[in-house]
Image (cartoon, rainbow, N blue to C red):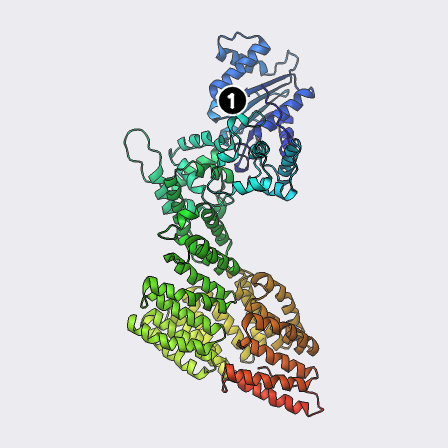
């Protein structure tokens, strides 16, 4: 019997594709890929085609067979023989054969136009010997969830049935609800369609549930996101299904799963699907589903064969064959040629599969999936497409199994790894949000793993430009760390190192120096003088001494540290290479081109060693190249610096991404070096292009954004627009004070630049007055002998002279 037309049947792209394929003759097999699994609408498309062909008079005989088994196929052909040929019903096999023979074209008979539809073929083997014969006057149409090679060939064509498009899904929901005098906002209809993955059967049953329970789309969607509710609870009961449907969405795939589990290697398809049900629906890497944790999960949960024989351990090859079995039954879409996104699973298949697990099995499978993702995650993948794919899998896992991964005892490493991967990929705001949610909403501030999450939160706050926020988090964290681990635990000492580092970056290098000097005796007492934490603290001390204005003392400290690191860690240790880089930076920062040139030679030697030890794409290698480019400019080779930055920026884009702070900083440096090379207008153009990218990537209040605006303001003045520079600095300074504070070194520098360009714009009196106030603040904040304090005094003297002179100034000294 031909199925009735579904309520609000949608004319979709698949209808035209089907008519083209079947209308050209031969046998067309309606199969489906992942996006057309059970519930995609194959039967309705076939029925629509058959009904149209019959109503238009295109066929003389129409046969519809529910072909779920070989016996059902035989019975269907036999019934056709009884009705068309008046065959005896006593021998169904003979009657069926007679009907197929009658379909054969015969030269001495009037052609009969026939259409045979075999709906829902469960196994290609069931069709052996029962394919309708090729005929110029006959057409055959088969629907099936299978997609083996046996379904094609011999004039048969494969037509894949996809999901509704977003427009088709919204139109369907609108029509169904309108038929019951219901109207919903368009955005809610579109969102509901996306929530249900555009699966026609799910849309039909969800719409029926909404109508029967008098819910709004918004309230239904809220229920759908509730992890506690099972999918079956959000759909009509079997007796209330629309369009004479007999199976709910939640039960649609159960038989397919059972059949896939019987395909060799038997017993692996079901546990493989259960694992994939916790991961990203739009792409799971092969490496995750063939990892050792996956193989251990398959081995443990493999359905045993006959007898009491222990199932053999699953191999990577077995895992791939299990994926192929699921692919054959259209439960997944497996594309081995795209290994980073080899497996796709419809989100409702995933949910129904998870719903079928016991509470214990749910938690065990979630943790196995987390183990698999963690093991398959390469260290250098974060900023690459693979990193984004792995984060999507981790996010999907955390979203559906947060409680299993963040228990009262521990948080799974994948949870912390995901947040750090976001930051390493340049998505620092997302990393901050991740760790904030993890700390407060999931673990609670006193959870042991929350301490690590809070430490990571401080790290990414600092990297995101909120060094003051990082300091605040560490200060709040330290008492809890001491309470949990004790004052002498390495984690406690490491947090104290972080506190000093972020305090220095927040504009208080003198305070950082004081903290480290207090910390070092404890490090030596507890860990020893040669412990990595002790050496790291000494590196931090040297850096902050330099930031506090004691460049010579910082260089001496770095030189002593380098000797100890070579002795303790070896010449190729990453810390040793970092100390060599810091020592070169300190020696090259003096306003001495010869010293900068010597520092460049050191960096060139260091770069060779970084490439040899770490590789060309390691962040430390790229940082060394960035410092080398900068010091080339300091050594007087601005053109060489421009060339070096032009070579560096594409590599940073490739390795860490276009939105990473390092990439944006390199673009800012390139713009500045263009100006220093004599192209002030080019510098302005480059900064104008950079500012919106920095705001979009880092936010308006990020220190990198403020620094980029400083560069644009300064080079506007250098390009001849002193008034424009003044305006830009006047707009920038309040933001500097609000974000960084009035005493932050960068704020003080901005005040000096504003005063300088006011003088160059013709207001020497105002410039002198500004420098009077600035010098007093610099003495208070930085000290009387700090290089920037001395530079401010020089500028004050200059603008006082200019205020008494009628000769315009061309002085271009920057503090």
Question: Can you say whether 723 is above or below 256 in the image?
Answer: below
Q: Nearer the viewer, residue 476 or 358?
A: 476
Question: Can you say whether 516 is above or below 129 in the image?
Answer: below
Judging by the rendered image, the residue that carries numbered circle 1 is: 67
Question: Can you say whether 604 is above or below 188 in the image?
Answer: below
Q: Position of residue 318 (x, y in %)?
A: 38, 39
Residue at image x 63%, y 28%? 7
Q: Position of residue 196 (x, y in %)?
A: 55, 39
The answer to whether 607 appears left or right of 714 in the picture is: left
Q: Nearer the viewer, residue 54 or 483?
A: 483
Q: Nearer the viewer, residue 356 or 711?
A: 356
Q: Position of residue 27 (x, y in %)?
A: 58, 25
Q: Is residue 616 visible?
A: no
Q: Nearer the viewer, residue 730 or 683?
A: 730
The answer to whether 106 appears left or right of 421 in the picture is: right
Q: Secondary structure at mark 1?
A: loop
Q: Position of residue 52 (x, y in %)?
A: 66, 24
Of all residues, the one furthest to the right in this rendering is 806
Q: Quadrant of the C terminus?
A: bottom right
User: Dot 1: few (<14), some (14–19), or many (≥20) neighbours within 10 Å?
Assistant: many
Of all residues, the one furthest to the front in this rendering is 214
Q: Quadrant of the N terminus?
A: top right
Quarter of the view holding residue 776: bottom right
Q: Is residue 766 visible?
A: yes
Q: How many callouts does the rendering have?
A: 1
Question: Can you say whether 21 is above or below 789 in the image?
Answer: above
């Amino acid at each position: 019997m031909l199925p009735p037309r579904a309520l609000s049947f949608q004319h979709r792209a698949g209808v035209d594709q089907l008519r083209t394929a079947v209308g050209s003759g031969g046998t067309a097999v309606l199969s489906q890929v992942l996006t057309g699994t059970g519930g995609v609408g194959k039967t309705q498309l076939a029925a629509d085609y058959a009904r149209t062909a019959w109503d238009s008079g295109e066929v003389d005989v129409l046969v519809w067979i529910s072909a779920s088994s070989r016996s059902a196929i035989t019975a269907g052909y036999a019934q056709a023989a009884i009705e068309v040929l008046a065959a005896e019903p006593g021998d169904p096999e003979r009657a069926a054969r007679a009907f197929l023979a009658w379909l054969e074209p015969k030269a001495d008979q009037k052609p009969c136009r026939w259409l045979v539809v075999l709906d829902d073929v469960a196994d290609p083997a069931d069709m052996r010997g029962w394919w309708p014969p090729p005929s110029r006057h006959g057409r055959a149409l088969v629907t099936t969830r299978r997609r083996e090679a046996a379904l094609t060939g011999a004039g048969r064509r494969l037509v894949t049935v996809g999901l509704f498009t977003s427009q088709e899904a919204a139109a369907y929901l609108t029509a169904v609800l309108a038929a019951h005098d219901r109207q919903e906002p368009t955005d809610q209809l579109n969102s509901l369609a996306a929530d249900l993955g555009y699966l026609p059967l799910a849309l039909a049953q969800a719409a029926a549930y909404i109508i029967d329970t008098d819910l709004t789309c918004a309230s239904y969607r809220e229920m759908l996101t509730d992890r506690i509710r099972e999918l079956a609870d959000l759909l009509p009961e079997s007796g209330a299904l629309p369009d004479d449907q007999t199976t709910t969405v939640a039960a649609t795939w159960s038989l397919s799963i059972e059949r896939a589990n019987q395909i060799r290697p038997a017993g692996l398809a079901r546990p493989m699907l259960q694992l994939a049900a916790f991961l990203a629906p739009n792409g799971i890497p092969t490496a995750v589903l063939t990892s050792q944790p996956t193989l251990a999960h398959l081995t443990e949960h493999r359905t045993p064969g006959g007898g009491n024989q222990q199932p053999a351990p699953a191999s990577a090859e077995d895992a791939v064959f299990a994926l192929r079995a699921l692919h054959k039954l259209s439960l997944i879409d497996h594309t081995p040629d795209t290994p980073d996104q080899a497996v796709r699973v419809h989100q409702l298949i995933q949910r129904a599969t998870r719903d079928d697990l016991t509470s214990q099995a749910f938690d065990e499978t979630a943790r196995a999936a987390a183990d698999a993702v963690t093991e398959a995650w390469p260290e250098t993948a974060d900023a690459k497409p693979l990193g984004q794919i792995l984060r999507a899998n981790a996010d999907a896992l955390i979203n559906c199994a947060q409680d299993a991964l963040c228990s009262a005892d521990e948080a799974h490493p994948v949870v912390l790894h995901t947040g750090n991967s976001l930051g390493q990929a340049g998505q620092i705001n997302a990393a901050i949000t991740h760790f904030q949610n993890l700390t407060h909403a999931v673990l609670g501030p006193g959870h042991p793993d929350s301490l690590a999450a809070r430490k990571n939160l401080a790290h990414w706050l600092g990297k995101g430009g909120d060094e003051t926020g990082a300091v605040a988090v560490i200060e709040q964290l330290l008492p809890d760390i001491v309470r949990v681990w004790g004052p002498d635990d390495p984690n406690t000492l490491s947090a104290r190192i972080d506190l000093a580092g972020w305090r220095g970056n927040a504009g208080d290098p003198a305070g950082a120096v004081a903290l480290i000097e207090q910390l070092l005796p404890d490090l030596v007492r507890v860990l020893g003088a040669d412990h990595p934490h002790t050496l790291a603290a000494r590196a931090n001390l040297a850096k902050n001494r330099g930031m506090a204005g004691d460049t010579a003392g910082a260089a001496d400290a770095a030189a002593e540290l380098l000797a100890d690191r070579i002795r303790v860690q070896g010449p190729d240790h990453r810390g040793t290479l970092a100390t060599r880089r810091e020592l070169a930076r300190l020696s090259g920062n003096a306003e001495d081109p010869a010293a900068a040139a010597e520092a460049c030679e050191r960096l060139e030697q260091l770069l060779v060693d970084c490439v040899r030890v770490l590789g060309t794409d390691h962040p430390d290698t790229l940082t060394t190249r960035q410092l080398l480019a900068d010091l080339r400019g300091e050594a007087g080779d601005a053109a060489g610096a421009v060339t070096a930055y032009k070579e560096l920026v594409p590599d940073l884009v490739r390795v860490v991404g276009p939105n990473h702070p390092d990439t944006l900083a390199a673009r800012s440096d390139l713009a500045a070096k263009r100006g220093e090379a004599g192209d002030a207008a080019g510098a302005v153009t480059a900064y104008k292009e950079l500012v919106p990218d920095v705001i979009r990537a880092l936010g308006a209040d990020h220190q990198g954004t403020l620094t980029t605006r400083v560069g644009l303001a300064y080079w506007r003045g250098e390009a001849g627009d002193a008034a424009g520079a003044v305006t830009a600095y006047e707009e920038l300074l309040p933001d500097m004070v609000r974000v960084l504070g009035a005493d932050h070194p960068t704020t003080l520098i901005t005040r000096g630049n504003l005063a300088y360009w006011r003088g160059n714009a013709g207001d020497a009196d105002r410039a002198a007055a500004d420098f009077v106030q600035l010098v007093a603040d610099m003495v208070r904040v930085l000290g009387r002998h700090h290089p920037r304090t001395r530079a401010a005094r020089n500028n004050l003297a200059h603008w006082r002279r200019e205020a008494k002179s009628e000769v315009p100034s061309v002085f271009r000294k920057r503090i």
